[in-house]
Amino acid sequence: MDFLKTEFKRFFSVTKWVLSLYFKTFPVYTTIYVVCRILVSFSNLFNAYVIALVTDEAIKLIGTGQISSSIYKILALFLGTAFFFTLVDIVNSYVWRMISYQEWWKFRKILSERLLKLGINQLEKPELTNKIQRFNESSSLLSEQLQITVNTIAVFITFVGSGFVIFSSIPLVAVIYLGVVIIESFSNQKFIRLLWLLNRNSTEERRKAATMSNILIEPAPLKELVLSGGTIYLQNKIDVFIDAVTDKFKKIRTDWNKAKIINKLLDSTIFGYGIYQILLRVINKVISVGQFTFEVRSLRIFADNLSQVASNIVDLRESAVKISDIYDIFSTYGQDIDGKIKIKTSDNDILFENVDFKYENSTRKVFNNLNLKIKAGEKIAIVGENGAGKTTLIKLLCRLYRPINGKILIGTLDINDIEISSWYKNMGILFQDYNAYTSLTVKENVEIDTEINKVTDESITNALKKANALDFVLEYKNGVDQILSERYKGGIRPSTGQWQKIAIARVFHRNAPVLILDEPTASIDAVAEAQIFDNIYKFSKDKTVIIISHRFSTVRNADRIIVLDKGKIIEEGSHEELLKINGKYAKAFKLQAKGYQ
């Protein structure tokens, strides 16, 4: 009983949230849609009543050879209301199409805004990732939930109207109908839960199958798969998943359909019995022929609407179960708490003070009592083996994650107390997994991180030049207006090295006081790399620069080099100082230099 109470409470919460989502996003259209849908629901019952009036009036006039004025009034009423309901239906259809045309884009925007507030650390949780996957699969159910909810309200109002007629004429039939619908509802509830459990328990496998399916349609990974024959391997794994889930889905749906057939047989039997009772009433002259047609039609409307209400509730429950994961994204997870202090200038030292950090669901600490000071305007390089904590340090500095102990200070301010958007305005960042915006042009790829009022043709050209990208961009057919994917008309595909240079140009163009580069030239040849780093040092004299790299040629000119090993700073100093120490840095540098020789 407690389970049912919890389930229905969640059902109403989800439905209420969906309604509020539409009313907030499309207030005018949604209001019009609801009103029109309720008005349209009255048309069948009203038409049945008018036809009954016409029938009785026609019977009165049989044999007279005349048409009374009341017939014209009734026909005028019928035609007038028919036109009215048609007009309402057209308006209803129009506003729904306007909602449908925009909702996918609007809701994706709302989701992205919500995920931004949750913080990167939450987005890497498997259970939240699963919910986002189910959002992508079930977002269309939001409109279905609204439609069914509004339809249920409209149908229920019509059901009440027809029910008044049926309860007053054949109450026993009405009571039996209610009993059958209640039994049907419990049956449907059982199968809804089975489908929900199947959907929930297979989410992880669906994510894997979806990932494999995406790989099979992406040009970059597909070329390796075609050459190696890996496509068959992935297709077979997808087929195994689909077959296993489909078999379970088929069994549940088959059993559900059997139950539905039994319920429909009961419905038809009761309807036949109801017509028999109404027929007795007209034979015994309790009601007129017109009233007979009205009661028969009312019985059909009553039965259909009662069944529709029950069916809609089932459909609402079924879609609400799937939508509940979308609802959880907006209601369950607490958003990242931002600071309130705005940083106006970046002329501040950066201090890591006794910082401890580990990733969620991990037992190993990445940092344990880390202490590091970066002076304003200093150029530092961070080196170390994979897994040493280099990129994690940058993520902490960007407050993508927060330390479990210790502090990160920007000047004298704790980074947790800073309004993060004001801190980001002072930073130009390029991660090793940088973004490539394939649907944008070169110019748009460069300016995307910059305030629009600071963008000029000259600023774009200068940024590309500093990143050693201007020459190849000018060779493009459309220059800086070249779209960067062959999947779009007139588009081309840059090489990996070209993409990285365009990404570096984006950082140059941002012209932020703090410059952070995580493996910025991994896909670039040595000559171009040297030119780019000359420009980095040349055009960032008053900036704080933090560089992460495995190539020692890119870090040797830094003011200070930090050597990380298993989350600890084991060496620091200039290139020459570290060579004199003859420690881990010197050995790695000599080994890499030997490789170049």
Image: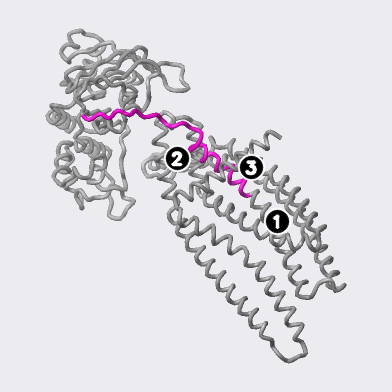
Question: Which comes sooner in the sequence, label 3 or label 1?
Answer: 3
Label 3 with label 1: CB-CB less than 8 Å = no
> Dot 2 corresponds to which residue?
229
Sequence-wise, which precedes: disc 1 or disc 2? 2
Q: Nearer the viewer, mark 1 or mark 2?
A: 1
Within-10-Å neighbours for mark 2: few <14, some 14–19, many 20+: few
Pair 2/3: label in front: 3
Mark 2: which amino acid?
A: Gly
The residue indicated by pointer 3 is: 195
* Secondary structure under the numbered disc 3 in the rendered image: helix
Picture residue at 21% right of the left edge, 20% below the top: 380
- Dots 1, 2 in contact, CB < 8 A: no
Above or below 83: residue 305? above
Q: Which amino acid does the dot numbered 1 rest on?
A: Leu
Crowdedness of circle 3 by 10 Å Cα count: few (<14), some, many (20+)?
some
Residue at image coords 22%, 30%:
344
Look at the image and say whether residue 320 sits in the magenta stretch.
yes
Could you tell me how far apart the alpha carbons at marks 2 and 3 are, in whole angstroms? 36 Å
Q: Report the amino acid beneath label 3.
A: Leu
Relative to 96, 478 lies left or right: left
Please tell me whether residue 108 is drawn above or below residue 101 in the rendered image.
above
Residue 471 is at least partly visible in this image = no
Q: Quadrant of the C terminus?
A: top left
Upstream in sequence: badge 2 or badge 3: 3
Expressed as whole percent of the image width and height from the top left, the position of residue 385 reads: 32, 19
Residue picked out by circle 1 = 306
Query: Please, which residue is most extreme toward the top here?
Result: 581
Q: Are marks 2 and 3 in contact (CB under 8 Å)?
A: no
Q: Which residue is nearer to you in this view: 152 or 507?
A: 152
Residue interval drawn in magenta:
315-344
Q: Is residue 410 left or right of residue 45?
A: left
Give neighbour class at mark 1: few <14, some 14-19, many 20+ (Cα, 10 Å): many
